[in-house]
Image: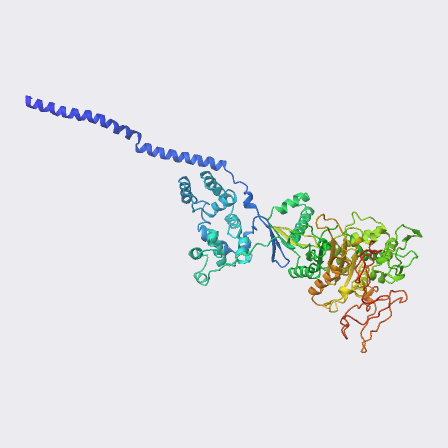
Amino acid sequence: MGRAEERRARQRGGRRAAPKRRRSSGAAGKSGIRRLFTFKKILGTFFGLCLLGMGAFIVLYMVIDIPEGNADAKRQSNIYKYSDGAIMARDGKVNREVVDLSRVPKDVRLTFVAAENKTFYKDAGVDLKGTARGLFNTLAGRGAQGGSTITQQYVKNYYLTQEQTVSRKLKELVISLKLDREKSKDYILAGYINTSYYGRNAYGIQAAAQAYYRTDAENLTVAQGAYLAALLQAPSQYDWAVASETGKKLVQARWNYVLKNMVEEGWLSQSERDSMKFPVPKEPKPAPGMEGQKGYLVNAANAALERQLVAEGIAGSTKEAEALVNAGGWTITLNIDKKKQAALEKSVRQQLTSKLDPEKREVDRDVQAGAASVNPKTGAVVAMYGGVDYFKHYTNNATRSDYQPASTFKPVILAAALEEQAETQDGKPITANTIYDGTSKRQVVDNGSKVGFAPENEDDEDYGKITVQTAMNKSVNSVFAQMGVDVGMSKVVEVAGKLGMDTENMEAVPAQTLGSMGASPLEMAGVYATLANHGKKVTPALVKSAEHLNKTVTMPDPVGEQAIGREAADSVTSVLTGVVDDGTAQASVRNNPKRDGQQVAGKTGTSDNNKSAWFTGYTPNLVTSVGLFGEDDKTHAQVPMYKAGGEPRVNGGGFPAQIWAAYTFGVMGDVTKFDLETQQGAAVQPTWTPTPTKEPTREPTQEPTTKEPSSSPPPTSEKPSSSPPPTPTTSPPTFTPPTAPETTPPADGGGGGGGGPIDPIQPGDEE
């Protein structure tokens, strides 16, 4: 090799050597990074992370169980309805009523699927893309994002909360997958539409149907259902009543979108879609509350339901039953007739409260009214008056039993006498025509011995020898005190219990003949309803039905077995027609121009020192008991009602009978008569008919020499077919003995109202 070649070779070698050193330095760095981030390592890391994530998810899946529903999602209101199904009130913080999916039309259910999750019936309960997007946005702080399935939305509403956190979203994912595996799609859909919020304080589809369309979920149309489904995206913005023009356009677009999806899925035909118009919702209406009489009715209905829950063993105690009712979710239908309820309230206003003036008379603020009206054939409580307003007077005057029923108890004594076929002290059978001594303060005797009880008649009036019929008409205390002893007070108490009175604390003593025990208008209405029902036991029923989800509580039959014999019951009814036509109730009831010949039985009552006044009366189809109670408006102690409403004394034949007559004759319908199996009492006595000379003719009654003369025509058993009865006027045709002027109706004998001016502090006022 020449020197030149050798030099070139060395040069080439040198040139190579230098780059090698440079490459050695640079290549070493590149190869290190490549070794660290090789494709295999990246792929391995990816799979490792996937496996780690899968492992973590498996652990989460195993650890996270389907929890109990949260309390807010379970909370419901109780719904109370009138007998015709109209809503009376809602009681509860959350306006929700859960309905079974079967009650929602299928096409309406599908509107929600079309709006929120068309693949609902095919997917596994989750939307992975939507969930991933939601997780990313949550991490990025972008707030809530859509994209969840119906299952996920239900899980969020029912099992979790609305908070936007990664942990909550991961729980939502796991629970949704599990729920989809364990529950049917219908179960999930039902939960979704029952827990979602629709605006207008309406939770669940039933509350929403009422809030927007005044109908039940089962009556919704597809168009209405599509609107409710569209609402879920933005309830406040899409509420038609408050939406802006933009909001209205958006909800209409959403509504169209829902129906378009239904057509695409084959759930709705194009022709059906084309025929639909946007269903504009009704204006918002305040949820029915507890004001006025509703609070009394709701509380009384709750109490009745609670008793039945204990009776059926559904609740182990009253406390437990109360908790079950207060938990909500009940639909309670009452027997209350909406029209009769309104009529009763109106009657109290017109006949009593409009005449009370607390500014003028301080006693007027102490007058409380209570009333209960019952259908004697079914036992249904069709109307109830609990007080001036539930928020002003909490105690329900219709169900309170702390005031004396006074002489409204006298028919119970007669019923016991007839049922037991009792006899007087001298061995004569007790009937409507039996003669008793009506002398005031007469000592009651038993087998020749005085029993230490000598009750005073009202105004200390002596009646002498009178029949039982007249004694009932005039409410003569001395007669019924003796009759109670003749029957045997233990038997009287026993019959009282059979008729429906609470006799647990009722002592079998002669003083009870004056009605000195406690009783409520509802209780007395039940007693008289049993008499009106020919002796068959009637237990007033306020609740018609009660349902909780798919469970129905069976309410007891209000009509029971024969409590007393029909003849005994019918005889009492016959006698009580005389109280109306010829006794203490004639001024308010007999002469009422709206009576129209209606046959009526009833009894007045005024208690010791005028602390209560009553009229309990009935037609063949309606029994109503009205009570007025003197209650101090501050201390709530029982107080007298003298001079209340401008009257010297509040008698049973006054305000109570007036309330009764205005209500009963306003709702009674066709004129009816009693179907009585008896030969006793005023209803079966010979009737009188006006003659062409306009002079009244009158058949003699039994034992005319011993019967107290009447200030009015004798009662009639029914409207004569040949000619109508005379229309009551200020001067009706009558026999008017000088001792019983027409202008002063008979007083109540310490147990019922009269009508004339009476000094409020008189002997005989206290029984």
Farthest-out residue, right: 448
Residue placed most toward the observer, 218 or 142: 142
Position above or below: 122 against 667: above
Farthest-out residue, front: 360
Residue placed most toward the observer, 107 or 671: 671
Q: Please give left or right for residue 572 compared with residue 540 in the image.
A: right
Quadrant in the picture for residue 249: bottom left
Residue placed most toward the observer, 621 or 100: 621
- Where residue 486 sits: x, y (%)? 88, 54
Q: Please give left or right for residue 317 compared with residue 744 in the image.
A: left
- Where residue 5 sits: x, y (%)? 7, 24
Tell me if I can see residue 539 in this picture: no
- Where residue 725 sits: x, y (%)? 77, 72
Q: Please give left or right for residue 635 compared with residue 739 in the image.
A: left
Q: Please give left or right for residue 74 compared with residue 583 in the image.
A: left
Quadrant in the picture for residue 755: bottom right
Residue placed most toward the observer, 140 or 650: 650
- Where residue 61 sits: x, y (%)? 47, 37
Tell me if I can see residue 393 in this picture: yes
Residue at left offset 32%, top offset 33%:
40
The number of numbered badges drawn on the structure is 0
Give the image's coloring scheme: rainbow
Q: Quadrant of the N terminus?
A: top left
